Amino acid sequence: MDSDPVYLHIRVVLSIILGLSITTLLRGLASIIEHPKRRGWSWIHLCWVVWALVSVVTFWWWEFRLGEVRHWNVETYLFVIGYCASWFMLCTLLFPDDVREFGSLENYLLQRRGGFFGVLALITVLDLVDTAIKGHSRWQMLGQAYWVHTVLMLVIAALGITMKTRRGHLWLALAALGYQCGYFAAEYFTLGSD
C-alpha cells in the first residue's frame, strides 16, 4: 500500500497543507495566550478553533486510507489537494491577519460567518467525494453514522450562516465541538485500529 510512489508523493503534499492548517490554529492560539486583549478572545471562537483542530487531525488520520486507491490520475490528485486546501482556508478564516475593523476575533467570526460556515459546508460535501475515491468498502465501513455526520454538519453550517444571536452561536459552537469530539472518539476507537 505505501510502496506506490504516486501515493507517497501525494501524502507528502497533503501533509504539508494539513501541517500548515494545524500551524495556523496553534499559532493563533499562542497569540491569544500571549496577548489575550489584542485580538480579543471568546468561547465561541475558541470552540470553533478546537473543533477545527480536532477535525483537521481526524481528517489527516483518515486520509491514510488514500493508500487503498489503486489508480491515481491528475483529477484525483487535484481534488485531494483542493480538499486539503479547503481545510487550510477554514483554519485561516479563524485567524485572519487583521481584525481591527471588527474589534475582536469573535466579532469577525460572527460578522463574516457566511465565509466560515460556507467553507464548512463545502468541506462536508467534498468529504463525500473523498470517501467515494477510497472505494465502496469505505462506505460500508463508515455505515449510517457517516450519513448522520454529513447531515448534521450541513445543518450546523446552515444554522451558522443564518443565526444572528451571540447566545445561539455559543450553543452551536459548543454542540459542534462536543459532537465532533464524540464522533472522532467513536470512529477512532472502532475503525482506526484496523
Image: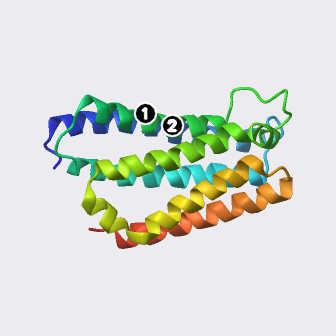
* Residue 153 in sight from this viewpoint: yes
Q: Locate residue 31 relative to residue 130 in the image: left or right.
A: right
Label 2: how many Cα within 10 Å (few below 14, some 14–19, many 20+): many
* Front residue of this view, candidates 188 and 112: 112
Where does the image place residue 73, in percent across and percent down from the top left? 23, 33
Residue 82, labelled with which disc? 1
The answer to which image quadrant residue 109 occupies is top right
What residue is shown at x 51% (from left), y 37% (from top)? 86
For the residues bearing labels 2 and 1, Cβ distance under 8 angstroms: yes
Where does the image place residue 117, in percent across and percent down from the top left? 65, 45
What residue is shown at x 16% (from left), y 50% (from top)? 1
For the residue marked with disc 2, what is the amino acid? Ser
For the residue marked with disc 1, what is the amino acid? Gly
Where does the image place residue 51, in percent across and percent down from the top left? 60, 54
What residue is shown at x 68% (from left), y 51% (from top)? 158
**Residue on which the image places disc 2:** 86
| Secondary structure found at label 1 | helix
The answer to which image quadrant residue 13 occupies is top left
* Front residue of this view, candidates 66 and 97: 66
